[in-house]
């Protein structure tokens, strides 16, 4: 029992250690924890005595993690985040409700997801959605995140993935003619500036292959990192763009941009997917959100499920 006890340090010691690391010193950590500096220093030293390993290198004016301390801090931070998330879910749970922590690409959230969320809130008022900042190269081991909406081909290691929308890509142009050249045939596109997205560098190549267009340079033209920026660039008259229809249909309908060749888009191999790790599959809040989300998506998407890799 004593050996098992040693492997489970008291929570207040772990929190003091993590806070000192996060703030880079005892002084600011003490303010955050509402303790004295001496109390925080004592707790950190007590934790080092508990594990029997130095966690900090101490000099006269400097406090730095040892290599062992760096590894331990990452693990402690994850455990504390998971504990906080579980406690929040428990506190907010009522009649099958609770909190669901979600991450989404900004443009998709603004253009597609958020306009539909009032319906979800009306159907599931007991579920609270918390948006976690989106990060590239998503890691499904992040304890503070339950699910994410990602852009890609649906394959992420360790994740279930349901296709939502985005593979239907539209060709859009400014509502006024660009460079006084009409766009009456797919071959006319090659004479215009082509805007590109960094995550879909092959888009214009796929489009030209689909419509048999020759002489088009798929790697020329300005490059953007968000589809919303590309839409705005087209509105400003910078050129033509290929954008998932789900993100630009409102602008086409309202006349802010035009679709010069209706039906001359293409079907992409990438789109937006609702993803979550196997360990979150039993969350009731996730199940409710998934069911609603797939009902909002394109009809064929409800059947698209990829098991964990």
Image (tube, rainbow, N blue to C red):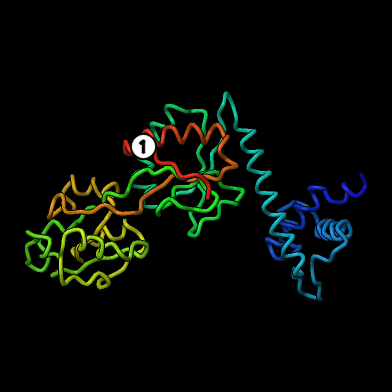
Q: Kindly state the secondary structure of the residue where label 1 is placed.
A: helix
Q: Where does residue 67 sit, x and y in percent of width and height?
A: 75, 69
Question: Would residue 128 appear left or right of 218 to someone viewing this image?
Answer: right
Residue annotated with mark 1: 116
Q: Badge 1 local density, few (<14 within 10 Å), some, or many (20+)?
A: few
**Which image quadrant for residue 190?**
bottom left
Residue beneath the point at 31% across and 56% down:
228
Q: Where does residue 53 sit, x and y in percent of width and height?
A: 85, 64
Q: 299 or 43: which is nearer to us? A: 299
Q: Where does residue 240 sit, x and y in percent of width and height?
A: 20, 62
Q: Would you place residue 173 above or below residue 63 in this image? A: above
Q: Would you place residue 190 above or below residue 74 in this image? A: below
Q: Quadrant of the N terminus?
A: top right
**Which image quadrant for residue 210?**
bottom left
Q: 140 or 84: which is nearer to us? A: 140
**Which image quadrant for residue 101?**
top right
Question: Would residue 74 appear left or right of 271 to someone viewing this image?
Answer: right
Q: Residue furthest right?
A: 2
Question: Would residue 187 appear left or right of 306 to someone viewing this image?
Answer: left
Q: Residue furthest bottom?
A: 60
Q: Would you place residue 275 above or below residue 204 in this image? A: above
Q: Where does residue 283 sit, x and y in percent of width and height?
A: 57, 35
Question: What is the count of numbered marks?
Answer: 1
Residue beneath the point at 89% across and 59% down:
49
Residue beneath the point at 76% across and 64% down:
69
Q: 155 or 8: which is nearer to us? A: 155
Q: 265 or 88: which is nearer to us? A: 265
């Amino acid at each position: 029992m004593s050996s098992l006890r040693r492997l489970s340090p008291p929570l207040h010691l772990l929190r003091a250690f993590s806070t000192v690391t996060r703030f880079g010193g005892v002084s600011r950590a003490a303010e955050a924890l509402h303790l004295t500096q001496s109390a925080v220093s004592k707790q950190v030293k007590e934790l080092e005595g508990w594990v029997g390993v130095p966690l900090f290198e101490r000099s006269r004016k400097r406090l730095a993690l040892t290599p062992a301390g760096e590894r331990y801090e990452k693990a402690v931070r994850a455990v504390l985040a998971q504990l906080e998330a579980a406690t929040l879910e428990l506190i907010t749970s009522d009649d099958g409700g609770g909190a669901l922590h979600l991450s989404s690409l900004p443009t998709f959230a603004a253009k597609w997801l958020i306009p539909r969320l009032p319906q979800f809130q009306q159907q599931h008022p007991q579920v609270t959605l918390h948006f976690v900042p989106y990060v590239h190269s998503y890691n499904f081991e992040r304890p503070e995140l339950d699910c994410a909406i990602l852009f890609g081909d649906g394959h992420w290691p360790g994740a279930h993935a349901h296709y939502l929308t985005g593979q239907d890509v539209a060709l859009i142009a400014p509502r006024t003619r660009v460079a006084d050249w009409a766009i009456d045939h797919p071959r006319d596109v090659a004479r215009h500036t082509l805007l590109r997205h960094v995550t879909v560098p092959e888009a214009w190549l796929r489009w030209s292959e689909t419509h048999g267009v020759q002489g088009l340079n798929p790697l020329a033209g300005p490059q953007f990192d968000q589809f919303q920026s590309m839409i705005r660039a087209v509105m400003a008259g910078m050129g033509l763009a290929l954008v998932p229809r789900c993100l630009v249909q409102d602008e086409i309908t309202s006349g802010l941009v035009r679709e010069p060749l209706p039906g001359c888009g293409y079907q992409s191999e990438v789109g937006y997917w609702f993803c979550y790790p196997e360990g979150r599959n039993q969350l009731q809040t996730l199940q409710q959100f998934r069911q609603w989300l797939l009902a909002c998506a394109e009809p064929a998407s409800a059947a698209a499920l990829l098991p964990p890799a």
